[in-house]
């Protein structure tokens, strides 16, 4: 017990009956006694345990009051901190990953403790879907305001067998939140006997980050994964069913998802246009009309709605999650300081029907160009390819050689032009 | 790391009068010091200088920054000495707890993962410590884990941290990583060569960094155990 209190470690107890009273010792008055006022900062601050049994990580949030207090009054618990509302941590009944949100971090976090160091930033990451799955690529430079803190940091982190996440923002935040997300997804998989979809994982991450909105946490992740069991037959059924009943699908979803699903079905319609040329435009018009119509009249189609409800959306997915609270689903995302340069390559070359080799080359080229132009991106490029069978990692490639190859190509081209000119003159 | 350049910037402001300046109480202080760790095929070396300074003062010439955690792991921490002490106390307590509940000592990889979560638990009031863990992994190979103050970590084969890290890291990149060298035979690093390299590197660091000097302490981790060696450096 004494050791645990020194460390401030809150471990989920193996035998709840033995340690249930321990949850009461999270009150500030007790901790000040136990620590003996040795660590000044902790006495006047409030502990904020996360809600429910699913507590991703216990955070120590310094409340700014102690910073404005005079140092003479250090170590004395103020009355206001004891009255803060602490959530009862219910270890006996761990809840499902629908995380009950704790009281959001108070605005008195600002001004935060002024840090004497800068945390790492700056990157180029990208992710896009195509017919062969999802490609996720990133550079490997981790910079710290002018110093390259690490030239070989992994920015694409696998979360589970069919989900990979690119990280941008503060490296520590991204690494830890990815770990937390991986743990939550694994728990979900064990409890519900199926993998959580990419959209679901994005929602989970977004909700876990929500209490920290307004703090200096900075995570901008692109979750790239393959949903479903990966049977292409099921894919076809899902898509055609949705075509037949766009209204039923729309009715089933929530507001935000509705727009996303429709935009996705629209993009799929445009891609499927090659196989269904005539009906494509009809469906396009109809789904747009249905989006407007459903607001006024919910349409029920009982005979086919059941099959739509049962079949899941499967296939490649890319969702962008930001610690500001933004959660976007799309086909192509690039995040980071080098993203404008990467977008220029991707927007011109990415299309649904590209082959795997083509996609790999385009991703690599995009990262290479971005590292060339952006000072905060560089070193190597990491590339992951996610398919129905899982993710596969391409060998990390040093882009230094690419410069020399490029120079060689340029030199040859100039020489050829010169010889052409001499030939023409003659 | 970058903190030295920032300090230079602040020092410039001190020489030019810019108007009334409000000094807020900062709970942090910078106590200097450099830590370095190198991993070989069957060894790991963690080295640190032993100077403890603050601003223009040297508090102590005998304050090494390597802390022995287990028989196969050594932690080097530099930055704010107060946070270093508390952090090592917490780590040692957690090691004991692990030993008592799991009946085995923590491996280097496990200690690294645990340290990452300990540091991130204080994301909004960080420990101002630059950590580097050096030790042997389960297979007996050398491992170095480098951290930033909020817990981002990864496994390397060499890393320098602390005030002179920006000077030492490029040299290590060249000599151990063979970066930017053409047509060289990349021999694996031997224990003797690593020791000599570290000593040379710290002598250079003491020349050019004011916060590094006095003495160098080396902790050499092999399967036989941990051997310590002390070498004097510039005292000025």
Image: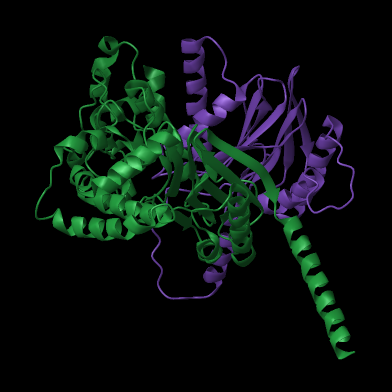
Query: In the image, A276: left or right of B86?
Result: left
> What colour has chain A?
green
In the displayed image of the protein, which residue is found farthest to the left? A296
In the displayed image of the protein, which residue is found farthest to the bottom? A425
Please say if B109 is above or below A336.
above
Task: Tell me how the rendering is colored.
Answer: by chain
Which residue is depicted at the point 79% across and 36% down? B231
Task: Indicate the position of residue B189 as horizontal and vertical percent values.
Answer: 83, 35
Which residue is depicted at the point 28% across and 55% down? A283
Could you say which is closer to the camera, residue A256 or residue B163? A256
Query: In the image, A86: left or right of A235?
Result: left
Could you say which is closer to the camera, residue A369 or residue B228? A369
Which residue is depicted at the point 32% across and 30% down? A55
Quadrant in which residue B186 is drawn: top right
Task: Indicate the position of residue A76 as horizontal and vertical percent values.
Answer: 26, 38
Please indicate, yes or no, whether residue A400 appears anywhere in the rendered image: yes
Query: In the image, B1: left or right of A100?
Result: right
Quadrant in which residue A44 is drawn: top left
Which chain is represented by purple in the image? B
Please say if B140 is above or below A131.
above
Task: Indicate the position of residue A96 as horizontal and vertical percent values.
Answer: 27, 27
Please indicate, yes or no, whether residue B79 appears anywhere in the rendered image: no
Could you say which is closer to the camera, residue B157 or residue A418? A418
């Amino acid at each position: 017990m004494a050791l645990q209190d020194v460390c401030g470690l809150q471990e989920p107890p193996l035998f709840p009956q033995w340690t249930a009273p321990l949850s009461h010792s999270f009150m500030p008055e007790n901790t000040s006694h136990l620590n003996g006022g040795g660590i000044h900062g902790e006495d006047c601050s409030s502990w904020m345990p996360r809600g429910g049994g699913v507590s991703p990580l216990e955070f120590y949030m310094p409340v700014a009051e102690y910073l404005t207090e005079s140092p003479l009054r250090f170590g004395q618990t103020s009355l206001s901190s004891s009255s803060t509302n602490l959530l009862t941590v219910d270890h006996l009944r761990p809840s499902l990953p629908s995380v009950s949100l704790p009281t959001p971090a108070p605005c008195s976090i600002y001004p935060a403790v002024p840090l004497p160091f800068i945390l790492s930033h700056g990157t180029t990451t990208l992710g896009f879907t195509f017919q062969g799955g999802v490609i996720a690529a990133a550079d490997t430079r981790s910079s710290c305001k002018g110093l390259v803190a690490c030239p070989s940091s992994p920015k694409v982190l696998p979360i589970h067998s069919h989900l990979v996440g690119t990280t941008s923002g503060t490296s520590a935040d991204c690494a830890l939140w990815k770990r937390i997300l991986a743990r939550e997804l694994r728990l979900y998989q064990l409890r519900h006997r199926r993998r959580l979809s990419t959209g679901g994982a994005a929602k989970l991450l977004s909700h876990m980050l929500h209490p920290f909105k307004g703090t200096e946490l900075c995570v901008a992740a692109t979750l790239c994964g393959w949903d479903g069991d990966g049977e292409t037959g099921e894919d076809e059924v899902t898509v055609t069913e949705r075509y037949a009943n766009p209204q039923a699908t729309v009715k089933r979803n929530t507001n935000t998802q509705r727009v996303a699903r429709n935009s996705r079905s629209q993009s799929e319609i445009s891609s499927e246009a090659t196989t269904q040329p005539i009906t494509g435009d009809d469906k396009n018009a109809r789904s747009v009309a249905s989006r407007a119509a459903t607001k006024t009249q919910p349409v029920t189609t009982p005979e086919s709605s059941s099959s739509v409800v049962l079949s899941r959306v499967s296939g490649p997915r890319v969702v962008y999650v930001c610690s500001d609270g933004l959660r976007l689903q799309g086909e192509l995302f690039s995040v980071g300081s080098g993203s404008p340069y990467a977008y220029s390559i991707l927007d011109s070359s990415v299309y649904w029907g590209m082959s795997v080799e083509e996609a790999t080359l385009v991703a690599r080229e995009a990262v290479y160009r971005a590292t060339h132009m952006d000072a905060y991106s560089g070193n190597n490029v990491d590339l992951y390819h996610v398919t129905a069978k899982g993710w596969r990692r391409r060998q990390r490639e040093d882009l230094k050689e690419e410069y020399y190859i490029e120079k060689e190509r340029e030199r040859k081209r100039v020489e050829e032009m010169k010889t052409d000119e001499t030939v023409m003159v003659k | 790391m970058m903190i030295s350049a920032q300090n230079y910037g602040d020092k410039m402001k001190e020489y030019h009068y810019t108007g009334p300046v409000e000094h807020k109480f900062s709970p942090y202080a910078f106590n200097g010091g450099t830590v370095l760790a190198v991993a070989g095929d069957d060894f790991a070396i963690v080295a640190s200088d032993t100077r403890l300074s603050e601003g223009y003062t040297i508090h102590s010439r005998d304050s090494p920054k390597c802390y022995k955690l287990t028989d196969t792991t050594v932690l080097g921490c530099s930055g704010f000495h107060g946070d270093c002490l508390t952090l090592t106390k917490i780590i040692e307590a957690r090691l004991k707890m692990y030993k008592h509940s799991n009946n085995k000592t923590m491996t280097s990889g496990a200690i690294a993962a645990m340290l990452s979560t300990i540091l991130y638990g204080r994301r909004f009031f960080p420990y101002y410590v630059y950590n580097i863990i050096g030790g042997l992994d389960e297979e007996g190979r050398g491992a170095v884990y480098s951290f930033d103050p909020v817990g981002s970590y990864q496994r390397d084969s060499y890393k320098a941290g602390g005030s002179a890290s920006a000077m030492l890291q490029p040299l290590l990149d060249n000599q151990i990583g063979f970066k930017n060298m053409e047509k060289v035979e990349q021999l694996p690093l031997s224990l003797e060569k690593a020791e000599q390299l570290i000593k040379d590197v710290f002598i250079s660091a003491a020349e050019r960094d004011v916060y590094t000097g006095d003495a160098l302490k080396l902790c050499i981790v092999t399967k036989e155990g941990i051997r310590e060696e002390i070498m004097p450096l510039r005292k000025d």
